[in-house]
Amino acid sequence: MKRVNPRPLAILDFDGVIRDSRRASHAAAKAALKAAGLKTVFSADEYWRMRGYAEFNNRFKALGAIYSVAVSGKRLRNLLRTAPESILALEKKHPAPEALLGEMREVNKKVSAMEILRSPFGENARRGLEKLGKAAVVAVVSDSGRRGVMKWVRAKKLTRFFKIILCREDVPEMKPSPKGILAVLGKMRARPGENVFYAGDAQCDILAARAAGVKAVGLACGMASEKMLWKAGADSVFSDLLGFADWLGNGSGKKRGGRGG
């Protein structure tokens, strides 16, 4: 089956790569904890890093984890040194009651919807999109809701950069499932291969890319550290979207080592 466009296909994660939503995520988690009668025991950067692990990337799974951390009285900063095992152990010891967790989720959703639109661009994201658009066909697969994603994209005047944007309403399973990536390939009449890349900032992005059979590109500008991205199986890691775009466009981007081309 012939591809619609012979250029490289670059499929991107959204939050952490294009939109820096760490402060919105932190505010929503803080509000959820407050509703549960608990105090905040973590910074925005610490909570964002925790969500870089595949086990806690989903925002509702992250709520259950941060509840357990808060109940334990331990500092997330210290737990991250031995994550994810240290946090998973606390979840077993201090599980969130299902009814309370449901209430926390509702608060989280409301606050997130208000805060997310104030989120700025990710590191070098605008310049990265400008350059990437000249080198490749660009698509997005996001676990975030379509309404919030599209409202932010339109506000930032980014619509022209993307051939396809798939959000959680469009995909039956969220990452690390590869179904979102495979759905883009189907719509583009493309096949997994050397010329197809999925770039993201969390471990679940790397796992999804590998499961889909495309090049797994880690971007160390968001949730996961460079070490975490390599551990998840990244083929290559760049500092941010601009670094990846430079490399894909003309080979000048600085790649942080790697197993793949």
Image: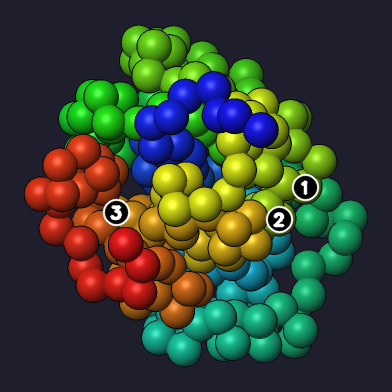
Q: Which residue is drawn at 85% across and 65% down?
A: 97
Q: In which quarter of the image is the N terminus?
A: top right
Above/below status of 35 relative to 213:
above
Instruction: Please identify the quarter of the rendering in which residue 144 is found.
Output: top right
Q: Is mark 1 on a helix, strand or loop?
A: loop
Amino acid found under the numbered disc labelled 1: Glu
**In front: 194, or 173?**
194
Is residue 29 something that shows in the picture? no
User: Left or right: 118 with respect to 68?
Assistant: left
Q: Are marks 2 and 1 in contact (CB under 8 Å)?
A: yes
Mark 2 or mark 3, whichever is nearer to me: 2
Residue at the disc numbered 3: 221
Amino acid found under the numbered disc labelled 3: Cys
User: Left or right: 130 with respect to 189?
Assistant: left
Q: Which residue is drawn at 33% across and 55% down?
A: 219
Mark 2 nearby-residue class (10 Å; few <14, some 14–19, many ≥20): some
Q: Which mark identifies residue 177?
A: 2
Q: Is mark 3 on a helix, strand or loop?
A: loop
**In front: 252, or 19?**
252
Residue at the disc numbered 1: 173
Q: Which mark identifies residue 224?
A: none
Q: Which residue is drawn at 47% across and 45% down?
A: 196
Image coordinates of residue 7 in percent, x first then y, are 38, 31
Instruction: Please identify the quarter of the rendering in which residue 3 is found.
Output: top right
